[in-house]
Amino acid sequence: MSIEASAFTIVQLCHINTISDKATRILNFIRRNIYGCSSEAKALTYTSLVRPHLEYASAVWDPYTTRDSNKLDKVQRIYYRRTTSASQLISELGWQSVAERRKTSRLTLLYKAINGLVGILMDELEHTSRCTRHCGPDAFIILQSRVDAYKFSFFPRTVSDWNSLPSSARSTPSVNCLKTALHRLSGVTNSHH
């Protein structure tokens, strides 16, 4: 592993630890102060005060190791455990895992970049030259790398996820339609959380 890739990994690990620790502290504060409140009130405080820390700019820094991803998902699992039966709450609220929400965030950002809705240069990406059953004209050539820090960075990782989407999801007319399609593909019934 190169020195640059190693330094990037260390910085990302510190960032993930900081985010996880801050979100856990806020979650513990909430838990102590709204113990007797309804499930709806607890869900609202979680989505308003904890989730933004777990998701801010996550399309850019989305962790690729299972260890780092689990560290962030653990905060949401702690929330589930503390409020009520986790399986009951998950089905009641229709929430995605934190990892799935980060994936949706990455795919949404790529959609916006493709459609000129954000100022991200798309110079690195080339459309596939031939259409197959699995990828149409809206698919991209997957970027190759031997270095994990680049291989799991935004473009290579998100292009792979993008190409695995059905063509109907990739060609949606708006960001909201894409998000709806992604929620449907992930099996989530409630797209508001």
Image (tube, rainbow, N blue to C red):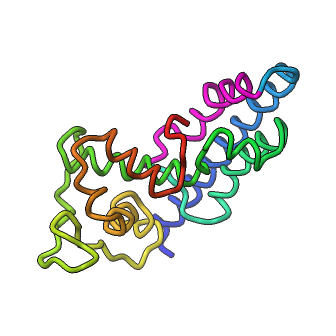
Q: Position of residue 100 (x, y in %)?
A: 54, 53
Picture quadrant where residue 161 is located:
bottom left
Q: Residue at x 59, y 65 (%)?
A: 65
Q: Nearer the viewer, residue 119 or 189?
A: 189
Q: Nearer the viewer, residue 150 or 189?
A: 189
Q: Is residue 55 magenta?
A: yes
Picture quadrant where residue 53 is located:
top right
Q: Residue at x 17, y 73 (%)?
A: 128
Which quadrant holds the C terminus? top right
Q: Residue furthest left?
A: 129
Q: Position of residue 77 (x, y in %)?
A: 75, 48
Q: Viewed as shown, does residue 126 lie left or right of 2?
A: left
Q: Position of residue 48 (x, y in %)?
A: 61, 25
Q: Which residues are magenta?
A: 39-59
Q: Viewed as shown, does residue 21 lie left or right of 117?
A: right
Q: Residue at x 26, y 44 (%)?
A: 112
Q: Is residue 183 magenta?
A: no
Q: Position of residue 111 (x, y in %)?
A: 28, 49
Above or below, 175 against 42 in this view is below
Is the stretch drawn in magenta largely helix, strand or loop?
helix
